[in-house]
Image (cartoon, grey):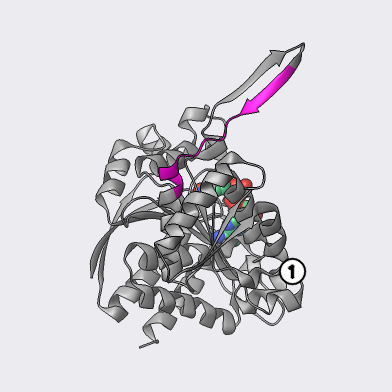
Amino acid sequence: MRKRITVLKGDGIGPEIVNEALKVLEAVAETYGHHFAYQCMDIGGIAIDQHGTPLPQETIDACLDADSVLLGAVGGPKWDGLPGDIRPEKGLLGIRKAMGLYANLRPARLFPQLADASPLRREIVEKGIDFVVVRELIGGVYFGEHKTEEVDGELVATDVMPYAEHEIRRIVQVAMEIAKKRRSCVTSVDKANVLDTSRLWRKVAGQVAAEHPDVAFSNMLVDNAAMQIVKNPAQFDVMVTENMFGDILTDEASMITGSIGMIPSASLGDGTRGLYEPIHGSAPDIAGQDKANPIGTILSAAMMLRYSFDLCREADAVEAAVAQVLDQGLRTADSMADGCTLVGCRAMGDAIAAAISAQT
Ligand code: NAD
């Protein structure tokens, strides 16, 4: 298979962690007979320095022209004083919008080797944590009308939370497709006992589920879902929810798996092209020191293989390689534990790439 990947390394540790992910993708290409062509473009602070804008038009064009996009991280103290519309983060929001990405996927997966990093009790962790939250990204209360007005001598604030059937239908459809590449189980999360938007959500989600009889489907109220994530996370495979509930539940889900350096994410729209990036920022405090954990970015590349290129065997191979090096006791500083061997960002990437090459 031949694929073109636009690479946005960004700022801080971005170039270091992305270089390791590219090393791993090359090991996959060589081992499984694929060809990946990379085009590196600027985004964030480096783009402000080079082009005067965090998202140059040529970066947008290259992303829209690619089969998929891999991103490191943007931002840093150098650009903190700039006005809002030329801040590095504007580049991120802009590229998500330009690519029409409405589904955000965040896996919550705990590698058993890092069980001690989870704040949950051992007997809960031992049942396994491996689920994905699919969050609707461009609708709901964040995009409805916001106003504060004076009524009868006091201020009254209102935030409108609109959802149209087509917005619900397409995100639940994404969740169904994701589930088919996993354990075929979808939990739709809403607040249907209170909100009209949730009652519509539940109705449309049920209709979409009926079109996918091979996927086990259920509904759960969001307050219960928040509890179940810490009480019995093993019950979940794919969770799908609206924008604000997803914002809260994805943060809760990432907390239960321990290190921030380990967690990947994907943003998808129509079609197969996506934007893949670790959930952490540019970590300026450790940039340029070969200390960053590249695993979140490497696992983001694995998500790209699975969800954009339908290369599930190759994605499994990357995840197995990560588990293997963790089994060997290799750790970057953020996840270091007693009895383990401290390695840098490059050595971690080398070890994961070597584990892939050794799999055949
Ligand atoms: P951060 O995620 O960059 O760092 C938080 C802490 O986690 C730091 O101590 C850092 O060293 C550590 N850390 C993060 N990733 C790590 C990794 N891969 N390996 C080891 N340690 C890691 O968050 P922050 O400090 O709040 O933000 C720093 C900059 O990143 C800011 O400019 C912020 O705007 C930006 N940011 C960007 C993104 C993004 O690009 N998606 C997301 C969040 C923050």
Residue 116 location, quadrant: bottom right
Residue 276 at least partly seen = no
Give the residue drawn at x 65%, y 68%: 233
- In reply to whether residue 43 is colored magenta, the answer given is no
Rendering coords of residue 66 (x, y %) = 27, 53
Q: Is residue 73 above or below residue 264?
A: above
Rate crowding at label 1 as few (under 14), some (14 to 19) or many (20 or more) other CA atoms within 10 Å.
some
> Which amino acid is tagged 1?
Leu
| Above or below for 313 versus 264 | below
Residue at 66 percent across and 43 percent down: it is 194
Give the answer, above or below, for where 156 lies relative to 99.
Answer: above
Whether residue 99 can be seen here? yes
Region of the chain picked out in magenta, as a range: 155-168
The residue that disc 1 covers is: 120
Between 126 and 146, which is closer to the camera in this rendering? 146
Tell me residue 228's x, y (percent): 69, 63
